[in-house]
Image: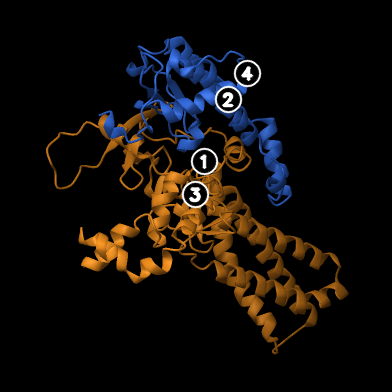
Protein backbone atom coordinates (compact mmCIF):
# COMPACT_ATOMS: atom_id res chain seq x y z
CA UNK A 1 0.00 0.00 0.00
CA UNK A 2 2.98 2.28 0.39
CA UNK A 3 3.28 2.43 -3.36
CA UNK A 4 0.19 4.55 -3.69
CA UNK A 5 1.63 7.51 -1.86
CA UNK A 6 5.10 7.79 -3.30
CA UNK A 7 7.08 9.78 -0.79
CA UNK A 8 5.09 12.96 -0.50
CA UNK A 9 7.89 14.62 1.36
CA UNK A 10 6.55 18.13 1.29
CA UNK A 11 3.02 16.86 1.73
CA UNK A 12 1.31 19.72 -0.02
CA UNK A 13 -2.00 19.43 -1.84
CA UNK A 14 -0.48 19.48 -5.32
CA UNK A 15 1.66 16.45 -4.64
CA UNK A 16 -1.21 14.56 -3.06
CA UNK A 17 -3.52 15.37 -5.94
CA UNK A 18 -0.85 14.19 -8.33
CA UNK A 19 -0.81 10.94 -6.38
CA UNK A 20 -4.55 10.53 -6.90
CA UNK A 21 -4.11 11.00 -10.63
CA UNK A 22 -1.35 8.43 -10.61
CA UNK A 23 -3.62 6.10 -8.72
CA UNK A 24 -6.28 6.44 -11.35
CA UNK A 25 -4.03 6.00 -14.33
CA UNK A 26 -1.30 3.65 -13.26
CA UNK A 27 -2.82 1.28 -10.73
CA UNK A 28 -4.97 -1.53 -12.00
CA UNK A 29 -8.57 -1.53 -11.00
CA UNK A 30 -9.60 -4.65 -9.14
CA UNK A 31 -13.24 -4.00 -8.39
CA UNK A 32 -15.92 -1.37 -8.11
CA UNK A 33 -18.56 -1.43 -5.44
CA UNK A 34 -21.67 0.68 -5.26
CA UNK A 35 -23.33 2.04 -2.15
CA UNK A 36 -27.01 2.33 -2.94
CA UNK A 37 -29.52 4.89 -1.82
CA UNK A 38 -31.56 4.53 1.34
CA UNK A 39 -35.18 5.45 0.64
CA UNK A 40 -36.60 4.70 4.07
CA UNK A 41 -37.32 8.37 4.70
CA UNK A 42 -38.69 9.24 1.31
CA UNK A 43 -37.05 10.65 -1.75
CA UNK A 44 -34.46 12.77 0.05
CA UNK A 45 -30.91 11.92 -0.84
CA UNK A 46 -29.46 9.49 1.68
CA UNK A 47 -27.05 6.59 1.25
CA UNK A 48 -26.99 3.27 3.04
CA UNK A 49 -24.43 3.01 5.81
CA UNK A 50 -24.23 -0.77 5.64
CA UNK A 51 -20.55 -1.73 5.47
CA UNK A 52 -19.82 -3.68 2.28
CA UNK A 53 -17.98 -6.96 2.74
CA UNK A 54 -15.42 -6.17 0.02
CA UNK A 55 -14.04 -3.32 2.11
CA UNK A 56 -13.56 -5.35 5.26
CA UNK A 57 -9.90 -5.97 4.61
CA UNK A 58 -9.18 -2.46 3.40
CA UNK A 59 -10.62 0.07 5.77
CA UNK A 60 -12.09 0.31 9.24
CA UNK A 61 -15.84 0.46 9.25
CA UNK A 62 -15.90 3.50 11.53
CA UNK A 63 -14.06 5.58 8.94
CA UNK A 64 -16.38 4.44 6.19
CA UNK A 65 -19.49 5.04 8.24
CA UNK A 66 -18.22 8.47 9.19
CA UNK A 67 -17.75 9.42 5.54
CA UNK A 68 -21.19 8.22 4.50
CA UNK A 69 -22.91 9.86 7.48
CA UNK A 70 -21.20 13.18 6.79
CA UNK A 71 -22.28 12.97 3.14
CA UNK A 72 -25.83 12.21 4.24
CA UNK A 73 -25.77 15.23 6.51
CA UNK A 74 -24.56 17.46 3.70
CA UNK A 75 -27.36 16.29 1.43
CA UNK A 76 -29.92 16.73 4.19
CA UNK A 77 -28.68 20.29 4.64
CA UNK A 78 -29.01 20.95 0.90
CA UNK A 79 -32.53 19.59 0.72
CA UNK A 80 -33.81 21.02 3.97
CA UNK A 81 -37.11 22.81 3.62
CA UNK A 82 -37.16 25.67 6.02
CA UNK A 83 -36.94 29.43 6.22
CA UNK A 84 -34.08 29.94 3.83
CA UNK A 85 -35.43 27.67 1.11
CA UNK A 86 -38.86 29.30 1.29
CA UNK A 87 -37.27 32.71 0.97
CA UNK A 88 -35.28 31.57 -2.02
CA UNK A 89 -38.37 30.02 -3.58
CA UNK A 90 -40.60 33.05 -3.08
CA UNK A 91 -37.95 35.44 -4.32
CA UNK A 92 -37.46 33.28 -7.37
CA UNK A 93 -41.20 33.19 -8.07
CA UNK A 94 -41.48 36.96 -7.69
CA UNK A 95 -38.71 37.53 -10.24
CA UNK A 96 -40.27 35.01 -12.66
CA UNK A 97 -37.44 32.57 -11.85
CA UNK A 98 -34.92 34.76 -13.61
CA UNK A 99 -32.94 35.02 -10.42
CA UNK A 100 -31.70 31.46 -10.91
CA UNK A 101 -29.72 32.70 -13.88
CA UNK A 102 -27.59 35.04 -11.76
CA UNK A 103 -27.58 33.51 -8.30
CA UNK A 104 -26.13 30.24 -7.16
CA UNK A 105 -28.73 28.19 -5.33
CA UNK A 106 -28.09 26.81 -1.88
CA UNK A 107 -28.05 23.29 -3.28
CA UNK A 108 -25.22 24.18 -5.65
CA UNK A 109 -23.23 25.72 -2.81
CA UNK A 110 -23.58 22.56 -0.74
CA UNK A 111 -22.61 20.42 -3.74
CA UNK A 112 -19.35 22.33 -3.96
CA UNK A 113 -18.72 21.66 -0.30
CA UNK A 114 -19.43 17.98 -0.87
CA UNK A 115 -16.99 17.82 -3.77
CA UNK A 116 -14.30 19.37 -1.63
CA UNK A 117 -15.03 17.01 1.23
CA UNK A 118 -14.85 13.94 -1.00
CA UNK A 119 -11.54 15.04 -2.45
CA UNK A 120 -10.16 15.59 1.03
CA UNK A 121 -11.36 12.19 2.19
CA UNK A 122 -9.83 10.56 -0.87
CA UNK A 123 -6.48 12.17 -0.28
CA UNK A 124 -6.27 11.56 3.42
CA UNK A 125 -8.03 8.28 4.02
CA UNK A 126 -8.98 6.38 0.90
CA UNK A 127 -6.09 6.75 -1.51
CA UNK A 128 -3.50 5.50 1.02
CA UNK A 129 -5.63 2.36 1.30
CA UNK A 130 -5.97 1.88 -2.43
CA UNK A 131 -9.56 3.08 -2.64
CA UNK A 132 -11.20 5.95 -4.47
CA UNK A 133 -14.63 7.46 -3.92
CA UNK A 134 -16.50 8.97 -6.87
CA UNK A 135 -18.76 11.94 -6.18
CA UNK A 136 -22.39 10.73 -6.37
CA UNK A 137 -23.34 13.67 -8.59
CA UNK A 138 -21.31 12.09 -11.37
CA UNK A 139 -23.46 8.97 -11.12
CA UNK A 140 -26.80 10.75 -11.08
CA UNK A 141 -26.98 10.79 -7.25
CA UNK A 142 -27.91 7.13 -7.34
CA UNK A 143 -24.82 5.47 -5.91
CA UNK A 144 -21.52 6.17 -4.24
CA UNK A 145 -19.03 4.36 -6.41
CA UNK A 146 -15.91 3.11 -4.64
CA UNK A 147 -13.08 1.87 -6.83
CA UNK A 148 -10.83 -0.75 -5.26
CA UNK A 149 -7.33 -0.84 -6.69
CA UNK A 150 -5.02 -3.80 -6.57
CA UNK A 151 -2.66 -3.94 -3.66
CA UNK A 152 0.82 -3.47 -5.06
CA UNK A 153 3.44 -5.16 -2.91
CA UNK A 154 6.42 -3.28 -4.31
CA UNK A 155 6.49 0.02 -6.11
CA UNK A 156 7.68 -1.05 -9.52
CA UNK A 157 6.64 -0.14 -13.01
CA UNK A 158 2.92 -0.44 -13.13
CA UNK A 159 1.11 -2.15 -15.95
CA UNK A 160 -0.57 -0.01 -18.57
CA UNK A 161 -3.98 1.59 -18.50
CA UNK A 162 -6.60 0.64 -16.02
CA UNK A 163 -9.24 -1.44 -17.69
CA UNK A 164 -12.55 -0.04 -16.62
CA UNK A 165 -14.80 -2.89 -17.71
CA UNK A 166 -16.20 -4.66 -14.71
CA UNK A 167 -16.08 -8.01 -16.42
CA UNK A 168 -12.41 -8.38 -15.66
CA UNK A 169 -13.15 -8.62 -12.00
CA UNK A 170 -15.98 -11.08 -12.38
CA UNK B 1 -3.52 -9.18 -46.75
CA UNK B 2 -4.95 -8.02 -50.03
CA UNK B 3 -6.47 -5.12 -48.16
CA UNK B 4 -3.05 -3.61 -47.58
CA UNK B 5 -2.19 -3.59 -51.27
CA UNK B 6 -5.49 -2.08 -52.20
CA UNK B 7 -5.07 0.49 -49.53
CA UNK B 8 -1.88 1.69 -51.16
CA UNK B 9 -3.41 2.26 -54.54
CA UNK B 10 -6.72 3.59 -53.33
CA UNK B 11 -7.27 7.06 -54.80
CA UNK B 12 -8.85 8.23 -51.61
CA UNK B 13 -5.74 7.27 -49.73
CA UNK B 14 -3.66 9.18 -52.27
CA UNK B 15 -5.71 12.31 -51.94
CA UNK B 16 -5.61 12.30 -48.17
CA UNK B 17 -2.20 10.77 -47.57
CA UNK B 18 -0.16 13.99 -47.86
CA UNK B 19 -2.33 15.54 -45.23
CA UNK B 20 -2.98 12.38 -43.24
CA UNK B 21 -0.55 13.48 -40.62
CA UNK B 22 -2.26 16.82 -40.53
CA UNK B 23 -5.62 15.15 -40.16
CA UNK B 24 -4.27 13.21 -37.21
CA UNK B 25 -3.12 16.35 -35.51
CA UNK B 26 -6.25 18.20 -36.50
CA UNK B 27 -8.29 15.43 -34.95
CA UNK B 28 -6.32 15.70 -31.77
CA UNK B 29 -6.76 19.46 -31.50
CA UNK B 30 -10.41 19.21 -32.58
CA UNK B 31 -12.64 20.56 -29.92
CA UNK B 32 -13.56 18.09 -27.25
CA UNK B 33 -17.10 16.89 -27.57
CA UNK B 34 -19.61 17.86 -24.93
CA UNK B 35 -21.75 15.30 -23.18
CA UNK B 36 -24.97 16.53 -24.73
CA UNK B 37 -23.77 15.45 -28.16
CA UNK B 38 -23.75 11.79 -27.10
CA UNK B 39 -26.82 11.91 -24.91
CA UNK B 40 -28.81 8.68 -25.40
CA UNK B 41 -32.32 10.04 -24.85
CA UNK B 42 -34.63 11.53 -27.47
CA UNK B 43 -33.93 15.15 -26.71
CA UNK B 44 -32.94 18.19 -28.64
CA UNK B 45 -30.30 20.60 -27.37
CA UNK B 46 -30.01 24.28 -28.19
CA UNK B 47 -27.24 26.82 -27.69
CA UNK B 48 -24.50 24.24 -27.21
CA UNK B 49 -26.32 22.30 -24.52
CA UNK B 50 -27.68 25.21 -22.53
CA UNK B 51 -31.32 24.44 -23.33
CA UNK B 52 -32.96 21.05 -23.49
CA UNK B 53 -36.17 20.19 -25.26
CA UNK B 54 -37.97 16.97 -26.15
CA UNK B 55 -37.31 15.81 -29.69
CA UNK B 56 -41.01 15.98 -30.46
CA UNK B 57 -41.60 19.56 -29.50
CA UNK B 58 -45.31 18.94 -29.82
CA UNK B 59 -47.38 22.06 -30.12
CA UNK B 60 -45.08 24.46 -28.31
CA UNK B 61 -45.02 26.84 -31.31
CA UNK B 62 -48.84 26.76 -31.30
CA UNK B 63 -48.98 27.56 -27.58
CA UNK B 64 -46.58 30.46 -28.00
CA UNK B 65 -48.40 31.63 -31.10
CA UNK B 66 -51.80 31.60 -29.42
CA UNK B 67 -50.56 33.54 -26.43
CA UNK B 68 -48.69 36.13 -28.49
CA UNK B 69 -51.45 36.63 -31.05
CA UNK B 70 -54.16 37.01 -28.42
CA UNK B 71 -52.10 39.48 -26.42
CA UNK B 72 -51.11 41.49 -29.49
CA UNK B 73 -54.73 41.78 -30.57
CA UNK B 74 -55.66 42.77 -27.03
CA UNK B 75 -53.01 45.49 -26.84
CA UNK B 76 -53.78 46.77 -30.30
CA UNK B 77 -57.56 46.91 -30.19
CA UNK B 78 -58.83 46.89 -26.64
CA UNK B 79 -56.21 48.76 -24.70
CA UNK B 80 -56.49 52.14 -26.43
CA UNK B 81 -60.21 52.24 -25.73
CA UNK B 82 -59.91 51.02 -22.16
CA UNK B 83 -57.02 53.34 -21.31
CA UNK B 84 -59.16 56.21 -22.44
CA UNK B 85 -62.27 55.14 -20.59
CA UNK B 86 -60.96 53.31 -17.56
CA UNK B 87 -57.40 53.39 -16.36
CA UNK B 88 -53.86 53.24 -17.69
CA UNK B 89 -53.07 50.25 -15.48
CA UNK B 90 -54.89 47.86 -17.77
CA UNK B 91 -52.08 47.47 -20.33
CA UNK B 92 -49.54 47.57 -17.50
CA UNK B 93 -51.12 44.62 -15.72
CA UNK B 94 -51.69 42.88 -19.03
CA UNK B 95 -48.06 43.40 -20.00
CA UNK B 96 -46.74 42.06 -16.71
CA UNK B 97 -48.94 39.00 -16.86
CA UNK B 98 -47.93 38.37 -20.46
CA UNK B 99 -44.24 38.58 -19.57
CA UNK B 100 -44.66 36.25 -16.60
CA UNK B 101 -46.58 33.72 -18.68
CA UNK B 102 -44.02 33.73 -21.48
CA UNK B 103 -41.04 33.43 -19.17
CA UNK B 104 -42.66 30.58 -17.22
CA UNK B 105 -43.50 28.78 -20.43
CA UNK B 106 -39.98 29.09 -21.76
CA UNK B 107 -38.49 28.00 -18.46
CA UNK B 108 -40.75 24.93 -18.41
CA UNK B 109 -39.89 24.01 -21.97
CA UNK B 110 -36.18 24.52 -21.82
CA UNK B 111 -35.33 23.20 -18.36
CA UNK B 112 -34.16 19.69 -17.70
CA UNK B 113 -37.17 18.12 -15.94
CA UNK B 114 -35.03 15.90 -13.72
CA UNK B 115 -33.67 13.36 -16.15
CA UNK B 116 -31.72 10.55 -14.56
CA UNK B 117 -28.58 9.57 -16.45
CA UNK B 118 -28.43 5.94 -17.50
CA UNK B 119 -26.47 3.53 -15.38
CA UNK B 120 -22.82 3.04 -16.26
CA UNK B 121 -21.92 -0.46 -17.45
CA UNK B 122 -20.23 -1.26 -14.13
CA UNK B 123 -23.27 -0.19 -12.16
CA UNK B 124 -25.59 -2.20 -14.41
CA UNK B 125 -23.39 -5.28 -13.99
CA UNK B 126 -23.43 -4.83 -10.22
CA UNK B 127 -27.22 -4.65 -10.16
CA UNK B 128 -27.50 -7.71 -12.39
CA UNK B 129 -25.32 -9.58 -9.96
CA UNK B 130 -27.60 -8.68 -7.09
CA UNK B 131 -30.83 -9.63 -8.80
CA UNK B 132 -31.77 -13.16 -7.95
CA UNK B 133 -32.32 -14.74 -11.34
CA UNK B 134 -33.12 -18.39 -11.69
CA UNK B 135 -30.26 -18.82 -14.14
CA UNK B 136 -32.31 -20.65 -16.76
CA UNK B 137 -32.50 -18.98 -20.12
CA UNK B 138 -35.91 -17.43 -20.41
CA UNK B 139 -37.28 -16.09 -23.64
CA UNK B 140 -38.56 -13.08 -21.74
CA UNK B 141 -37.05 -11.82 -18.51
CA UNK B 142 -39.56 -11.54 -15.67
CA UNK B 143 -40.41 -8.03 -14.53
CA UNK B 144 -37.88 -7.09 -11.93
CA UNK B 145 -39.15 -5.31 -8.86
CA UNK B 146 -37.69 -4.51 -5.50
CA UNK B 147 -39.74 -3.72 -2.44
CA UNK B 148 -38.63 -1.11 0.01
CA UNK B 149 -40.10 0.59 3.01
CA UNK B 150 -40.77 4.28 2.84
CA UNK B 151 -42.12 5.78 6.04
CA UNK B 152 -43.30 2.33 7.09
CA UNK B 153 -45.14 1.77 3.85
CA UNK B 154 -44.21 -0.83 1.25
CA UNK B 155 -43.35 0.65 -2.13
CA UNK B 156 -42.34 -1.34 -5.21
CA UNK B 157 -39.43 -0.14 -7.27
CA UNK B 158 -39.39 -1.26 -10.88
CA UNK B 159 -36.35 -2.06 -12.94
CA UNK B 160 -35.95 0.04 -16.06
CA UNK B 161 -34.60 -2.07 -18.92
CA UNK B 162 -33.63 0.96 -20.96
CA UNK B 163 -31.73 2.80 -18.28
CA UNK B 164 -30.54 -0.42 -16.61
CA UNK B 165 -31.30 0.54 -13.05
CA UNK B 166 -34.00 0.31 -10.44
CA UNK B 167 -36.04 3.45 -10.71
CA UNK B 168 -36.01 5.55 -7.56
CA UNK B 169 -39.44 6.13 -6.01
CA UNK B 170 -41.71 8.51 -7.96
CA UNK B 171 -39.54 8.16 -11.02
CA UNK B 172 -41.05 7.09 -14.30
CA UNK B 173 -39.72 6.40 -17.76
CA UNK B 174 -41.11 8.71 -20.43
CA UNK B 175 -41.48 6.77 -23.66
CA UNK B 176 -41.58 9.91 -25.78
CA UNK B 177 -38.29 11.23 -24.47
CA UNK B 178 -36.81 7.80 -23.68
CA UNK B 179 -35.54 8.99 -20.31
CA UNK B 180 -36.28 8.22 -16.69
CA UNK B 181 -37.51 11.42 -15.07
CA UNK B 182 -37.56 12.05 -11.34
CA UNK B 183 -40.94 12.83 -9.78
CA UNK B 184 -42.46 12.35 -13.22
CA UNK B 185 -45.71 14.22 -13.60
CA UNK B 186 -46.60 13.93 -17.27
CA UNK B 187 -45.27 14.71 -20.73
CA UNK B 188 -46.94 17.91 -21.81
CA UNK B 189 -47.20 18.39 -25.60
CA UNK B 190 -48.26 22.03 -25.16
CA UNK B 191 -44.99 22.76 -23.50
CA UNK B 192 -42.94 20.33 -25.56
CA UNK B 193 -41.19 18.72 -22.61
CA UNK B 194 -41.73 16.38 -19.67
CA UNK B 195 -42.87 17.92 -16.42
CA UNK B 196 -40.86 16.53 -13.54
CA UNK B 197 -39.10 17.46 -10.34
CA UNK B 198 -37.04 20.35 -11.64
CA UNK B 199 -39.60 22.16 -13.77
CA UNK B 200 -42.87 21.44 -11.99
CA UNK B 201 -42.86 24.80 -10.23
CA UNK B 202 -42.34 26.59 -13.57
CA UNK B 203 -45.20 24.60 -15.09
CA UNK B 204 -47.49 25.39 -12.19
CA UNK B 205 -46.71 29.09 -12.32
CA UNK B 206 -47.25 28.98 -16.09
CA UNK B 207 -50.76 27.53 -15.86
CA UNK B 208 -51.79 29.69 -12.90
CA UNK B 209 -50.55 32.90 -14.51
CA UNK B 210 -52.10 31.86 -17.81
CA UNK B 211 -55.46 31.45 -16.04
CA UNK B 212 -55.10 34.95 -14.66
CA UNK B 213 -54.08 36.28 -18.07
CA UNK B 214 -56.97 34.69 -19.96
CA UNK B 215 -59.49 35.73 -17.32
CA UNK B 216 -58.10 39.26 -17.34
CA UNK B 217 -58.24 39.56 -21.12
CA UNK B 218 -61.70 38.03 -21.20
CA UNK B 219 -62.92 40.46 -18.59
CA UNK B 220 -61.40 43.45 -20.39
CA UNK B 221 -62.93 42.44 -23.70
CA UNK B 222 -66.38 42.02 -22.15
CA UNK B 223 -66.00 45.45 -20.54
CA UNK B 224 -64.96 46.90 -23.88
CA UNK B 225 -67.99 45.44 -25.59
CA UNK B 226 -70.34 46.61 -22.85
CA UNK B 227 -68.94 50.12 -22.88
CA UNK B 228 -69.08 50.40 -26.63
CA UNK B 229 -72.57 48.96 -26.65
CA UNK B 230 -71.94 46.87 -29.71
CA UNK B 231 -75.21 45.29 -30.63
CA UNK B 232 -74.66 43.37 -33.82
CA UNK B 233 -71.38 44.32 -35.44
CA UNK B 234 -68.52 42.92 -33.42
CA UNK B 235 -65.15 43.48 -35.03
CA UNK B 236 -63.20 40.40 -36.04
CA UNK B 237 -60.41 40.95 -33.57
CA UNK B 238 -62.82 41.07 -30.65
CA UNK B 239 -64.46 37.89 -31.87
CA UNK B 240 -61.13 36.11 -32.15
CA UNK B 241 -60.12 37.11 -28.67
CA UNK B 242 -63.47 36.12 -27.23
CA UNK B 243 -63.42 32.70 -28.80
CA UNK B 244 -59.86 31.90 -27.82
CA UNK B 245 -60.36 33.13 -24.29
CA UNK B 246 -63.65 31.38 -23.78
CA UNK B 247 -62.31 27.96 -24.67
CA UNK B 248 -58.99 28.40 -22.94
CA UNK B 249 -60.50 29.63 -19.73
CA UNK B 250 -62.42 26.47 -19.01
CA UNK B 251 -59.55 24.14 -19.82
CA UNK B 252 -56.81 26.25 -18.20
CA UNK B 253 -58.82 27.00 -15.08
CA UNK B 254 -59.70 23.34 -14.78
CA UNK B 255 -56.08 22.31 -15.18
CA UNK B 256 -54.93 24.87 -12.61
CA UNK B 257 -57.51 23.62 -10.17
CA UNK B 258 -56.43 20.03 -10.71
CA UNK B 259 -52.76 20.84 -10.23
CA UNK B 260 -53.51 22.89 -7.13
CA UNK B 261 -55.16 19.79 -5.70
CA UNK B 262 -52.08 17.72 -6.64
CA UNK B 263 -49.71 20.22 -5.06
CA UNK B 264 -51.73 20.36 -1.87
CA UNK B 265 -51.68 16.59 -1.51
CA UNK B 266 -48.09 16.15 -2.78
CA UNK B 267 -49.11 13.87 -5.63
CA UNK B 268 -48.07 13.67 -9.23
CA UNK B 269 -50.44 13.34 -12.20
CA UNK B 270 -48.90 9.94 -12.86
CA UNK B 271 -49.69 8.70 -9.35
CA UNK B 272 -53.16 10.18 -9.40
CA UNK B 273 -54.06 8.56 -12.70
CA UNK B 274 -52.69 5.18 -11.68
CA UNK B 275 -54.33 5.45 -8.27
CA UNK B 276 -51.15 4.43 -6.49
CA UNK B 277 -52.21 5.76 -3.15
CA UNK B 278 -55.96 5.42 -3.34
CA UNK B 279 -57.62 3.65 -0.46
CA UNK B 280 -59.23 0.98 -2.58
CA UNK B 281 -57.03 -1.76 -1.17
CA UNK B 282 -57.98 -1.13 2.40
CA UNK B 283 -56.77 1.11 5.16
CA UNK B 284 -53.30 -0.35 5.53
CA UNK B 285 -51.84 0.36 2.12
CA UNK B 286 -53.49 3.67 1.51
CA UNK B 287 -51.97 7.01 2.18
CA UNK B 288 -49.32 8.85 0.33
CA UNK B 289 -45.99 8.20 2.09
CA UNK B 290 -44.52 11.41 0.69
CA UNK B 291 -47.19 13.73 2.00
CA UNK B 292 -46.42 15.92 4.97
CA UNK B 293 -50.08 15.68 6.04
CA UNK B 294 -50.47 19.44 5.98
CA UNK B 295 -51.64 21.36 2.95
CA UNK B 296 -49.39 24.34 3.54
CA UNK B 297 -46.29 22.21 4.06
CA UNK B 298 -47.06 20.21 0.94
CA UNK B 299 -47.47 23.37 -1.12
CA UNK B 300 -44.32 24.93 0.24
CA UNK B 301 -42.29 21.76 -0.23
CA UNK B 302 -43.38 21.30 -3.82
CA UNK B 303 -43.24 24.89 -5.00
CA UNK B 304 -40.75 26.61 -2.73
CA UNK B 305 -38.46 23.73 -1.97
CA UNK B 306 -34.77 23.76 -2.87
CA UNK B 307 -34.00 23.64 -6.56
CA UNK B 308 -32.18 20.36 -7.28
CA UNK B 309 -29.30 20.41 -9.76
CA UNK B 310 -29.38 18.91 -13.23
CA UNK B 311 -27.92 15.41 -13.13
CA UNK B 312 -27.06 15.03 -16.77
CA UNK B 313 -24.22 17.57 -17.03
CA UNK B 314 -25.01 18.63 -20.57
CA UNK B 315 -22.09 20.97 -21.04
CA UNK B 316 -19.38 18.84 -19.50
CA UNK B 317 -16.65 17.60 -21.78
CA UNK B 318 -16.25 13.98 -22.68
CA UNK B 319 -12.84 12.48 -21.90
CA UNK B 320 -10.90 12.11 -25.18
CA UNK B 321 -10.82 8.30 -25.17
CA UNK B 322 -14.60 8.14 -24.91
CA UNK B 323 -15.00 10.78 -27.61
CA UNK B 324 -12.87 8.80 -30.07
CA UNK B 325 -15.24 5.94 -30.97
CA UNK B 326 -18.25 8.26 -30.98
CA UNK B 327 -16.55 10.70 -33.34
CA UNK B 328 -15.43 8.04 -35.78
CA UNK B 329 -18.96 6.87 -36.39
CA UNK B 330 -19.97 10.30 -37.59
CA UNK B 331 -16.88 11.16 -39.63
CA UNK B 332 -15.15 8.75 -41.90
CA UNK B 333 -11.73 9.60 -40.55
CA UNK B 334 -8.51 7.76 -40.18
CA UNK B 335 -8.57 5.50 -37.13
CA UNK B 336 -10.97 2.95 -38.64
CA UNK B 337 -9.86 4.02 -42.09
CA UNK B 338 -7.87 0.92 -42.89
CA UNK B 339 -10.62 -1.46 -41.88
CA UNK B 340 -13.34 0.51 -43.62
CA UNK B 341 -11.32 0.92 -46.74
CA UNK B 342 -10.55 -2.75 -46.77
CA UNK B 343 -14.19 -3.67 -46.61
CA UNK B 344 -14.97 -1.23 -49.41
CA UNK B 345 -12.39 -2.79 -51.60
CA UNK B 346 -13.27 -6.35 -50.84
CA UNK B 347 -17.02 -6.01 -50.59
Which one is closest to the eye, mark 3 or mark 1?
A: 3
Q: Judge if badges 1 and 2 mark residues of a common chain.
A: no
Q: Which residue is mark 4?
A: A12
B278 shown above or below B78: above
- The residue sitting at 62% across, 14% down in the picture is A10
In whole angstroms, how far apart are the C-alphas of marks 2 and 3? 27 Å
Q: Position of residue B14 (x, y in %)?
A: 38, 68
B269 shown above or below B291: below
Which one is closest to the eye, mark 1 or mark 2?
A: 2
B52 shown above or below B301: below
Which image quarter: residue B131?
Answer: top left
First reached walking from the N terminus: tag 3 or tag 1: 3
In whole angstroms, how far apart are the C-alphas of marks 3 and 1? 33 Å
Q: Secondary structure at mark 2?
A: helix
Q: Secondary structure at mark 4?
A: loop
Q: Which residue is mark 2?
A: A74
* Total number of numbered discs in the rendering: 4
Badge 4: residue crowd in 10 Å (few <14, some 14–19, many ≥20): few
Q: Chain of mark 3?
A: B
Q: Which mark is residue B266?
A: 1
In whole angstroms, how far apart are the C-alphas of marks 4 and 2? 26 Å
Q: Chain of mark 4?
A: A
Quadrant in which the N terminus of chain B appears: bottom left
Which image quarter: residue B277?
Answer: top left
Which hue is chain A drawn in? blue
Furthest-left residue in view?
B136
Q: Which residue is mark 3?
A: B35
Amino acid sequence: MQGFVPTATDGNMATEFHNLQELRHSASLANKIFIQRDYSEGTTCKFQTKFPSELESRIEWTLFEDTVKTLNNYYAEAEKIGGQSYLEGCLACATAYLIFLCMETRYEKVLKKIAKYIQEQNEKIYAPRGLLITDPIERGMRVIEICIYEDRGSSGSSSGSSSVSGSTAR
Amino acid sequence: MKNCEYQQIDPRALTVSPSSAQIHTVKKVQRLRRKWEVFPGKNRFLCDGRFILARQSGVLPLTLGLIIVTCCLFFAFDCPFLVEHLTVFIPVIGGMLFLFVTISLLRTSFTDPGILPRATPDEAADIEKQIDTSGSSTYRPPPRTKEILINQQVVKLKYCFTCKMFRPPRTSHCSLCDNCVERFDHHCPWVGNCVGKRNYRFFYSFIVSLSFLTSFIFGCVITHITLRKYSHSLSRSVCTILVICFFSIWSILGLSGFHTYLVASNLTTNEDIKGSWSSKRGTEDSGNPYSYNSIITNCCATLCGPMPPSLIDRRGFLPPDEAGPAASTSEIELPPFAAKNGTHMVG
